[in-house]
Image (cartoon, grey):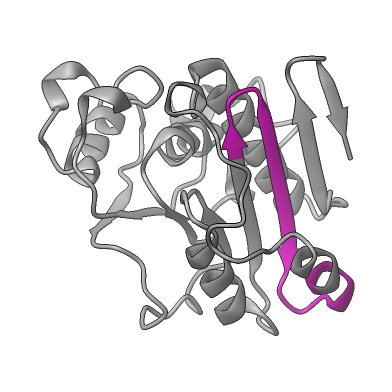
Amino acid sequence: MLEEIWMRQKGLIDPKKLTMPILIVGAGSIGSWTALALGKLGCSNITVMDYDLVEPQNVGSQIYKSSDVGMNKIQALKERIGLLLENDINTIDEAWTPAYDLSNFAIVIACVDNITTRSQLFDQLQDKDVLYIDARMAGNALEIYTVKGNDEEDIKAYKKTLFLEGEEIPVECSERSVVYNVFIVSGLITDIVAKYANKQELPRELVMDLYNFTLFK
């Protein structure tokens, strides 16, 4: 039965290649849907780490329902995804800090809302044989960066995307997240993971402008 679930995609990506341990840092707009998308792809070793509670404004663009408001995101995510996936996900109900060792993961995906945590994740993964995927989003714009931690050119390119906390372009509260954008971001991340498993070339940078339906690579 399980073999039949993925029979229509096996020519693109075989779930047998997707057993590598994956960590998603953040269970919000991008992280919650990415966990679902990767699970549907056939990834069997997914861990999601977050410490926030579900708030009313999360419901419109994240996997949660209004009945989840007030719950720990990690608990609510595990319950929601448990209804939709064949394999359970692992969850860690705490914030990531540099004290948390990332060396046991093959892929680390940053779905966080601040540049400091992105920089700290990157700092720990440099020189390690780990794929780092950093997803950023604001309204109708999205950016995805991939870094193989032991690739000097990837590291050099990624460093150019970092800035100090407070230097980011301000975004209106009502324009921070919309569901069609997070679906696109999570889909692109999932495609990158599939390409990585297939040992295909990965894009260092994807930037999409949904106002003009333009994708830059």
Residue 173 placement: quadrant: top left
Which residue shows up at 21% across the image and 35% down it?
Answer: 54
In magenta, the rendered stretch is 137-155
Up the image or down, 163 lies above or below 173; here it is below
Q: Can residue 151 be found in the magenta stretch?
A: yes
Report how many numbered discs are placed on residues in the image.
Answer: 0
Q: Nearer the viewer, residue 193 or 11?
A: 193
The picture places residue 92, in percent across and down from the top left corner, at: 26, 59
Left or right position of 90 against 156: left
Q: Can residue 106 be found in the magenta stretch?
A: no
Q: Quadrant of the C terminus?
A: top right
The picture places residue 203, in percent across and down from the top left corner, at: 84, 49
Residue 64 visible in the shown view: no
Q: Quadrant of the N terminus?
A: top left
Which residue shows up at 30% across the image and 63% down it?
Answer: 95
The picture places residue 4, in percent across and down from the top left corner, at: 52, 23
Which residue shows up at 21% across the image and 31% down it?
Answer: 55
The picture places residue 87, in percent across and down from the top left corner, at: 35, 40
Left or right position of 161 against 8: right
Which residue shows up at 19% across the image and 35% down it?
Answer: 76
Up the image or down, 171 lies above or below 15; here it is above
Left or right position of 105 against 51: right
Residue 107 visible in the shown view: yes
